[in-house]
């Protein structure tokens, strides 16, 4: 099973991937209580579901490192303000052309 080509990822995606490889390896191998579940006779649907839950938890608690909310907030704020300015400058207005009024767009 291949994990994909790391070089085909953007630098940010590669960093996120590397962080989760480390986290997942720690969860799956470095913890004896989890590692013993990978022995074939111990592996069952419930133990795999528990490990999947731990891996999902690792991702969920890392969301701020994946997409820092501070940066996301700035991006959303800029998009809202830019959209507001664009709409106000592009809205139909009454113009005077050669002494007469004309409608907007």
Image (spheres, rainbow, N blue to C red):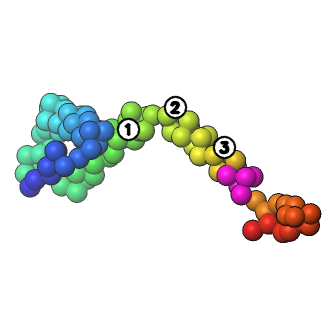
Earlier-in-chain disc, 1 versus 3:
1
Quarter of the picture containing the N terminus is bottom left
Earlier-in-chain disc, 3 versus 2:
2
Per the picture, the main secondary structure of the magenta-coloured stretch is helix
The location of residue 103, given as percent across then percent down, is 84, 69
Q: CA distance from mark 1 to mark 2?
A: 12 Å
Residue at coordinates 22% horizontally, 57% vertically from top-left? Answer: 45
Residue at coordinates 85% horizontally, 64% vertically from top-left? Answer: 97
Q: Residue furthest front?
A: 98
Circle 1 sits in a helix, a strand or a loop, which is it? helix
The location of residue 56, given as percent across then percent down, is 33, 45
Q: Callout 2: 10 Å neighbours few (<14), some, many (20+)?
A: few
Q: Label for residue 1?
A: none
Quarter of the picture containing the C terminus is bottom right
Q: Callout 1: 10 Å neighbours few (<14), some, many (20+)?
A: some
The residue tagged 2 is: 70
Asked whether residue 88 is drawn in magenta, I would say yes
Residue 33 shows in this picture: no
Circle 2 sits in a helix, a strand or a loop, which is it? helix
The residue tagged 3 is: 81
Circle 3 sits in a helix, a strand or a loop, which is it? helix
Nearest the eye: 71 or 34? 71
Residue at coordinates 13% horizontally, 35% vertically from top-left? Answer: 29
Residue at coordinates 49% horizontally, 34% vertically from top-left? Answer: 71
The residue tagged 1 is: 66
Q: Is residue 5 above or below residue 63?
A: below
Q: Callout 3: 10 Å neighbours few (<14), some, many (20+)?
A: few
């Amino acid at each position: 099973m291949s994990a994909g080509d790391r070089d085909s990822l953007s630098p940010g995606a590669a960093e996120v991937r590397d962080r989760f490889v480390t986290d997942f390896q720690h969860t799956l191998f470095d913890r004896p209580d989890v590692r013993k579940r990978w022995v074939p006779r111990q592996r069952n649907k419930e133990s795999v579901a528990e490990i999947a839950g731990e891996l999902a938890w690792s991702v969920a608690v890392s969301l701020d490192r994946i997409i820092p909310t501070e940066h996301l907030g700035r991006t959303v704020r800029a998009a809202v303000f830019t959209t507001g300015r664009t709409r106000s400058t592009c809205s139909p207005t009454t113009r005077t052309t050669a002494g007469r009024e004309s409608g907007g767009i």
